[in-house]
């Protein structure tokens, strides 16, 4: 965590992906159709404290959310859903803080919070790839 905070002194974004060095930031896979995962993701985001759903673009697979941090800064979060097969969906998250200073690891923690909530909700469908 200290490494994340130090990196966060200058970085104001974080993202997940296939090739993420940190195993916690790896793309998540679920054995459900994109439509079903979409509904679950939107439902989870609506229940998470401090998150505000801004845009849903189903044909592109993007959900845009805003989060206000404890310090009053705003984070813009894009959650992207990809169809792998008709019954398998991948989720990646990009989170960036507004403003010029680093985020002190805030975007990293935001992504982990969202993934943790999704993993709880979709535990029966999680796929290790």
Image (cartoon, grey):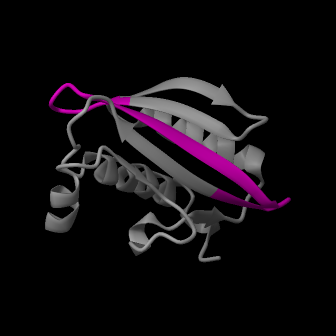
Q: Is 93 above or below relative to 6? A: above
Quadrant including the N terminus: bottom left
| Nearer-the-camera pick, 105 or 51 | 105
Picture coordinates of residue 46, whole percent (x, y): 48, 31
**What is the count of numbered marks?**
0
Q: Is residue 32 left or right of residue 19?
A: right
Give me the residue at 46% from left, 38% from top.
77
Q: Residue furthest right?
A: 86
Give me the residue at 85% from left, 59% from top.
86
State the image quarter where residue 30 is shown: bottom right
State the image quarter where residue 92 is shown: bottom right
Q: Is 48 above or below relative to 36? A: above
Picture coordinates of residue 20, whole percent (x, y): 47, 69
Give me the residue at 14% from left, 65% from top.
2
Asked if residue 107 is among those painted magenta in the image, a careful observer would answer: no
Q: Is residue 100 left or right of residue 79?
A: left
Q: Main structural element of the magenta stretch: helix, strand or loop?
A: strand
Q: Is 36 above or below relative to 46? A: below
Picture coordinates of residue 107, whole percent (x, y): 32, 47
| Nearer-the-camera pick, 115 or 75 | 75
Picture coordinates of residue 13, whole percent (x, y): 36, 46
State the image quarter where residue 7 is shown: bottom left
Magenta segment? 67-90
Give me the residue at 51% from left, 50% from top.
93
Quadrant including the C terminus: bottom right
Asked if residue 71 is among those painted magenta in the image, a careful observer would answer: yes
């Amino acid at each position: 965590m200290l490494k994340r905070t130090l990196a966060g002194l200058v970085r104001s974004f974080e993202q997940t992906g296939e090739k993420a060095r940190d195993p916690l930031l790896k793309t998540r896979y679920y054995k459900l159709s994109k439509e079903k995962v979409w509904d679950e993701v939107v439902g989870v985001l609506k229940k998470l404290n401090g998150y505000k759903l801004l845009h849903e673009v189903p044909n592109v697979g993007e959900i845009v959310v805003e989060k206000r941090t404890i310090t009053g800064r705003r984070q813009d979060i894009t959650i992207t859903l990809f169809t792998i097969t008709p019954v398998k969906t991948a989720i990646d998250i990009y989170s960036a803080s507004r403003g010029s200073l680093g985020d002190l690891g805030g975007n990293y923690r935001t992504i982990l919070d969202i993934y943790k909530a999704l993993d709880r909700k979709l535990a029966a469908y999680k796929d290790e790839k």
